[in-house]
Structures are given as C-alpha cells and as structure tokens.
Amino acid sequence: MDLLQTVMSPAVLFLYAALVAGIVLLFCTMAKLIRWAKRRPAGAYFLLALLPLISLLPIPPAEVKKLQHIKQEQVKRKQEAGEPPPDEPTV
C-alpha cells in the first residue's frame, strides 16, 4: 500500500505528466521540422549543416580511435576479399 501511495503522489504524477507532455511536444516539433525540410528551403540545408556543430557533448578521443580502427578493419577485409580500393579524390 505504501508503494501505491508513493507512485500516486502528486509530485510523481506531475513528473509523469511533464514527461509525457515533453515527448508529445518533441514528436510534434520533429513532425513540423520534417514537413518544413521536405519543401527543401535553403534553411533546411543550413540547419543540417549546423546540427553537428551544436552537439552538447564532444566525441571522446577513445571513441574516435575505435572508429578509426573499425574503418581500418573494414578496408583490410575488403582488400582480402579482392575488392579494389575505393577511388578517393585527392584534394
């Protein structure tokens, strides 16, 4: 019974309502962004270019090293399979 009172307390119910409202708001906002981007204004491309720059957390160096190692393994597997290396343009 004590657990039921804790779960049904006004503070917990408010948190649940806020969470649900936040999720609904997020989905509505994403739907509007998708509709806006499908019309392909120049702003959509600009927004897509800025989104990676405004990330809250930087990518840790350990993750970058893991990604580089994974890419190297994929290149080795392709070379062992006999596929020609991809033509990469030189800058």
Image: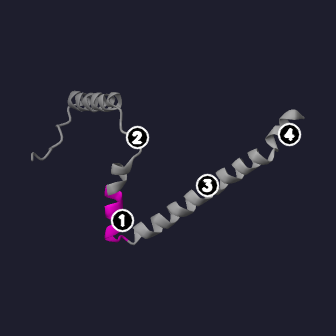
Which label number is shown at residue 11?
none
What is the CA distance from the residue labelled 2 to the residue labelled 4? 38 Å
Disc marking residue 57: 2
Pick the front one: 11 or 89: 11
Which segment is the magenta one? 40-49
| First in sequence: mark 2 vs mark 1 | 1
Query: Could you tell me residue 15's position as x and y percent?
Result: 70, 48
Indicate the position of residue 91 as horizontal and vertical percent values.
9, 47
Q: Which mark is residue 22?
A: 3
Q: What element carries label 1?
A: helix
Q: Is residue 35 left or right of residue 24?
A: left
Disc 4 element: helix
* Magenta stretch contains residue 4: no
Residue nearest the observer in this picture, 48 or 72: 48
Q: Do the residues labelled 3 and 4 touch (CB within 8 Å)?
A: no
Classify 28 as above or below 75: below
The amino acid type of the residue labelled 2 equals: Leu
Question: What separation in Å lies between label 3 and label 1 (alpha carbons)?
Answer: 24 Å
Task: Say which residue label 4 marks.
Answer: 5
Q: Which amino acid does label 3 sit on?
A: Gly
Q: Main secondary structure of the magenta part?
A: helix
Direction front: furthest residue? 11
Circle 4 Cα neighbour tier, 10 Å, few/some/many (<14 / 14–19 / ≥20): few
CA separation in Å, label 3 and label 2: 21 Å
Disc 1 versus disc 4: distance between alpha carbons? Answer: 48 Å
